Amino acid sequence: MKFGVNILNFGPGTDAGTLLGWARFAEDEGFHFAMISDHLAVTPDVAKQYPAPFYDPFTALAWLAGRTSRIGLGTTVVVLPFRHPLEVARMAADIDEYSSGRLILGVGVSWARREYAALGVPFERRGAITDEYLEVITRYWTEDVVSFAGEHVAFEEVSVASASAGRRRPPIWVGGASGAALRRTVRFGDAWHPLNLRPAQIHEGLAALRAAALEAGRPVPAFAPRLPLRVTGSPLPEDERLAGQGTLDQIRGDLLALAGLGAEHVLFDTYPGTPAAMRPPEEDRRTLRAVADAILDLDRGEVRR
C-alpha cells in the first residue's frame, strides 16, 4: 500500500506557507502522495465546517508541483459540477505535465446546497452533471479534437490544449458511497475513494462495487480510502468507530484489513471535523509520525511510508 497525507487548505492561519509546509512534511517523511480538498464558494453551510480562507486546489497543486519532486499530488475531492469540464480537463492535464505525471484527480459531488445555489448549478442534478463532465474529461485526455452534445454541456470541435493529451492521463478517483457513486466509479474511475466509513461499511461498499462492475461488464476499480485519522489512548467500540480511529493497535488492524481487501492507497486525514477542534499542525504531524512508525513493522506486502 501507498500512504498519503490530506493537506488542510482552509481555515484561519492557513496560507501559502502552511500549504508548502505540509507538502514538504509529506515528502520529507516518506509519504507517497498528498491531496487537497475543494470548495469554490464559502457559503454559510460550507463555512460552518470548512471556514475561509479556502485555497483553490488547482492553483495550489500547480504551485506545489514546482516545490516538490517525488510525492503524488491530488484532489480529495474536486467538486466536479462547479467548473466547466473543459477547464477541469485542461488544468488537470497541465498540472500532470508540470509534475511529470504525479497528479491524481479525485472527483465528487459534495453536499452544500447553498454553494450550488451561489454558483447557479442545480443541486438535484449534480450526479448527472458529474457523469457528463467525466465523459468530457476522459475524452479530452484521449482525443485530439473533442465534440460533445449532452444535457448539461455541449460544444463542437474543441482542440485539446495540453501537450500530454493522448499520451498519458491522470488517474481518476471517485468519491462517494451511494449506488450512483459506485456505478460512476466503475464507469469512469481508476479507484474508489470513500471516506468516513466504519470497517463493516467498507466490506459492504466493496461488495457493492464488485456487483456494479459485474453488472456493467467492467473491471473492478482499485480501492483508495480516505481515513479520518484520530489516535486515542484507549480502544474505541468496534461497532461505533470509523476506520482510522482508535488506538494505534486498532488503526494498525484497520490497515492490515485494508491491505487484505486490496487497498492500493490510503489517505490519512487529520481534520477533526469541526473548526473548533482543529489542532496545531505540529500536533497533527506528531500523530502522522506515530501512525507511520506503527505501520513500519507490518509484514504484509510493501506496507511502508
Image: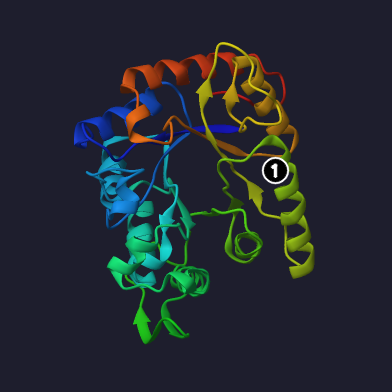
Q: Tell me the residue at 69%/34% (across/down).
A: 258
In the image, is residue 205 above or below residue 112?
above
Q: Residues within 10 Å of mark 1 (few under 14, many from 20)?
A: some
Tell which of 43 and 172 is nearer to you.
Answer: 43
Q: Can you give x and y, in whole percent of width and height, for residue 297 in the image?
A: 64, 14
Q: Is residue 162 visible?
A: no
In the image, is residue 225 above or below residue 119?
above
- With 267 as the anchor, is 114 left or right in this view? left
Q: Can you give x and y, in whole percent of width and height, for residue 20 in the image?
A: 26, 32
Determine which quarter of the picture holds residue 178. bottom right
Q: Tell me the residue at 70%/49% (across/down).
A: 205
Determine which quarter of the picture holds residue 83. bottom left
Q: Can you give x and y, in whole percent of width and height, for residue 92 in the image?
A: 37, 58
Tell which of 110 and 146 is nearer to you.
Answer: 110
Q: Is residue 89 visible?
A: yes
Q: Tell me the residue at 30%/40% (across/down).
A: 9
Tell which of 75 and 30 is nearer to you.
Answer: 75
- With 69 as the anchor, is 184 left or right in this view? right
Determine the secondary structure under disc 1: helix
Q: Which residue is mark 1?
A: 201
Q: Tell me the residue at 41%/33% (across/down).
A: 271
Q: Can you give x and y, in whole percent of width and height, for residue 283 in the image?
A: 37, 17
- Residue type pointed to by label 1: Gln
